[in-house]
Every structure is written in structure tokens, then in C-alpha cells.
Amino acid sequence: MPRAKKISAPILEKKTEKKPKKIIKTVKKVKPAVKKAVLKKKALPVIIDIIEDDEDDIPEKYFPELPETISEKISDVTPIEKHNNSSDIDQQKKFFSTLITEIKEKNPSGNQKNKHQENDNLDDEPTTKKSVSLYRRLVWRFIALTVVLLLIVFYFSFSKLTITLSPKGEAINDSLLLKVSPAGATGVGETNSDTDFREQVTGTAKEVAVSGENTYQATGEEFIGDEIAGTVNIINNSPKSQALIATTRVLSSDNKMYRIKTAVNVPAGGEVPVAIYADKPSEDLAISATTFTIPGLWVGLQDKIYAKSTQDFVFRQKVKKYIKSSDIEQATNEMNNILLAQAKNNGSSLGKDQAVLYQTLNPANFVISANAGDAKDNFTVKASGTLVMVNFSKTDVAKLAAAKLNLLVPDDKQLVDYNPENITYSFDSFDDKTGVATVKATFSGTMVLKNDSDIIDKKQLVNLNKDQLVNYLKTFPEIKSYEFSFFPSFITRAPRLPERISINIKGLDK
């Protein structure tokens, strides 16, 4: 029900004093929206305008009957102005009480109307509840849409993917032909003609004469039977020297007979070692060290001149040594190394920056004391020849090699793992008239992606999941391995904006 709005106390007193009987009271009807608000909030005050008019103009119905609850809460309505004087408040209550009594007397049908109004208010309650439920649903939908919008903004603004690439090193190899000539002939790196593609380096090339001699053992063996091998010492304790011819017999204490291989002359009071053999070799003749008598001597001298072994005799197969062709070939190769070692002694005084090469111009001259197939235990080889010694600057070659490799490296890659000490040199040719030598230098390096390389197109990574990213990166042979760092960590998909994707390239692992 509508309730009275504020009423200025001074106005009420003024009207009642002048014409109390001609007061016209009109009530502004409150709109339906106000009725609904009454159910939800405290009752709103009724606005009453008091004007002077004739009694004939007063409408039949001034106010509907106020419910008791509203009447009781009139005192709860916050007044516009609080009067400190309690008498003014009592006059207002008295006035409203008189006014309500007059309305009831003049408008008996007002009670019925108020009842209808109350029924209308009751009818409005379900509508109000529906409105509140709809409002709540709209509020929750708005909150949900707001959260979704915030998540979308967060995803585009804060999601990030960092890909760390470990490049795979690609080996590159190349070579240069070097023209070695004395300093001042031409500038380093220049050539003498348009058809000469050799790189000029400072150095010298000269001939060195070398020679040498060495003895080598024959390795050929031919089986010719069994034998007993051993050595005895012939001891002479007599006052005279004693000569013994080859094949002289020596007899062991168990009557096993052997013969000496060579003739000996044993001085008085001395002893001489000599090898022995057996006429009929067998395993039982391989005896331990013992003392032997010499049965060919006079019996009176056998206790003074005798033989004694210090080591066991050995039963073995008897072979004949001879020179094989491989022995001669091996001997000549070793003699070439000996000649080379002599030449290197001449160049040992050069600095560490100098690279030195040696090469024989022609095969060395060899003089061999035996031929292949000769039955000899050893043979002698003499050799002589001329070698070319070439020396040049390693620093100059290292610069040329690095420049050549850098020409082979693409713009998006860089040269790494290039070590000038790993350059290998080989002799190519020598001009004895001009004294210019040609040397081949072979070198290698490794190229990897630059740290700022843009080999990866970030637009191709947009919105890809982790498996798709892996499949894409596998198409690049330059990439060895990769790591993904998603932010936030629960997201495993690349951002939709290329600017939110970062590519980092590590250095080459050595």
C-alpha cells in the first residue's frame, strides 16, 4: 500500500487554523511499480497535497483504507525532518487519526476497495518472484560470459611458447692447391696467371741428398728334420791347450752321445762354449744340464778335459733359413724411412709455424747383398737417393682454408669447430727448374644455425599442439633436438599470435 510522504508541519498548522472545515484532501495514486516495491522494501511514504477548495469539489473517495501494518509502520518511516518538539509530532498523529476517521465515515466502500488492492498485491507476488529468478539467471549468465571473456583475454595476452633448438652440426670439407715459392715472389693469395688456380704461400722447396745402410734377418724357413739343440762348455784343466775337431763326441753319464758342431782350441786352464747335435735326434736326448766325458781323448786326460752343460738340451724340428721376397721388399721400405729420417734431421731447426713435407723425386738406389731364395740367415741393404723438402707458413694456409670454408657456409649458418691444426698436407709436384712445389691442403669444419637464424616460420606454428610441433620440427635436418616451454604450463598448444612464440638456438655442443 502507498504510504504518506513527508508533510511540512508549518503548512498543516496554517491550514487547520484558517479553514479547518474546507480542507480538501487529495491522494496521488501510486503506480503499480510502487506497489511491487512495497513488498520488497519498506513502505514508501504517501504524498498528500493539502489545498483550499470548496466542499462541493471534494471527491467522494479520498483515501483507501490503510492497512493496519502500514498504520503501525508510519512511525517507522524516516521523516524528512525530525522535530525536537514532541507537541508537533502529537498534533500530526492527531490530524491523521481524525482524517482517517472522516474518510471511513464518508467512504464506507473504501474498505472493500482496499481489500481489492490487497488482493492485487497478493496477485503481484508470483510475478515479483519470477522477475527475481529471471534477474538472477541473467546475472549468472553475465558472470559466466565475463569469466570466459577474461580467459580469452588472458590466453591471447599471457600465453607464451618458448622453443629451444639444439642445432645439428653439418660437416663441410674442402681442399686447396698451394703454390710454395720463396718470399717476395708474389703476394700471398695471388696467382701468376688466369689458368693457375693455386694459392700462393710463402715457403721454400729444395733437394736433399741422403743415404743409409742396414742389416735384416731372413724369415724364410724350410723343414729338414728333427734335431737336438744345446750348448756345452769344453773345460781344460791340463797344463796344455787342447784342440778338438768338429764332430768330436761328448758322452753323458747315462751313455747318451752327442757331437760338437765346430772345431775349438781350448787353452790350458780355460773353457770354450760350443754347440752340440745328435746323430739320431729323439725326444729322450733332450736331457737336463749335466757333465760329459770326451771318449776320444786319452783316458788319463778325460778327468782333466771334459764338457759341461748349464742349460737343458731341446728337441726340435730342424729348419733351414732362406731369404724371402717379402724380406727384401720390407727392407727397402724401411730404408726409405731411414732416408726420410735423415732429411727430417735437416729440417728440425725450422720454427713451429712452419709445415714441412718430404718427398722422394725418384726411387732410391738400393744395393742388396742377397737375392730372394738364398739360404741365408740375414742380408744387408744399402740405399741412397734425393728427397725434396718443402716448408711453408701454417698461418697463411689456415687463413686461406678458413676463407674457403666460409664461402661454403649459407647466410643463416655459421662456421664452428674449425681447427687449423687438423689441416693435412700432401706433396703434389715439384719443378726442379723453378724450385716451386705444389702442395695439397685438405681441411674440414662444422657449420650450424646462427643464434638469430629465422629458419623457423612462427606463423607455421600458430595453434599447433605438441605432437604437431614435433612433426614440423622433424622436417629440418639442421635441428638435432628441441625443447618446449609452455606458459601457463597446463596449456600444450602454441599461441594463436606469432608474437607470443619465441625461438632460441643453443650453441654447438662439443
Image (spheres, grey):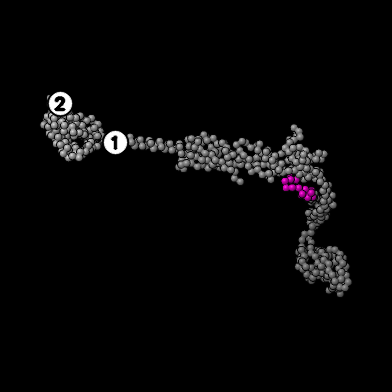
- The answer to whether 123 is drawn above or below residue 203 in the figure is above
In the image, which residues are magenta?
340-356
Q: Residue at x 23, y 30 (%)?
A: 32
Q: Is residue 110 left or right of residue 393?
A: left
The residue furthest left is 105
- Residue 36 vs residue 303, the one in the foreground: 36
Examine the rendering and report whether any part of residue 40 can be seen: yes
Which one is in front in this view, the residue at disc 2 or the one at disc 1?
2
Pointer 2 or 1: first along the chain: 2
Label 2 neighbour load within 10 Å: few <14, some 14-19, many 20+? few
Among the 4 quarters of the image, the one containing residue 232 = bottom right
- Residue 246 vs residue 38, the one in the foreground: 38
Q: Residue at x 79, y 64 (%)?
A: 230
Q: Decide whether residue 354 is among the magenta residues.
A: yes
Among the 4 quarters of the image, the one containing residue 401 = top right
Among the 4 quarters of the image, the one containing residue 254 = bottom right
Q: Position of residue 422 (x, y in %)?
A: 68, 45
Q: Amino acid at mark 2?
A: Asp
Residue holding disc 2: 53
Residue holding disc 1: 133
Q: Amino acid at mark 1?
A: Ser
Q: Position of residue 243 (x, y in %)?
A: 88, 68
Q: Is residue 228 left or right of residue 87?
A: right
Q: Secondary structure at mark 1?
A: helix
- The answer to whether 303 is drawn above or below residue 128 in the figure is below
Label 1 neighbour load within 10 Å: few <14, some 14-19, many 20+? few
Q: Residue at x 54, y 35 (%)?
A: 457
Q: Cα distance, mark 2 to mark 1? A: 48 Å
Q: Decide whether residue 184 is among the magenta residues.
A: no
Q: Secondary structure at mark 2?
A: loop
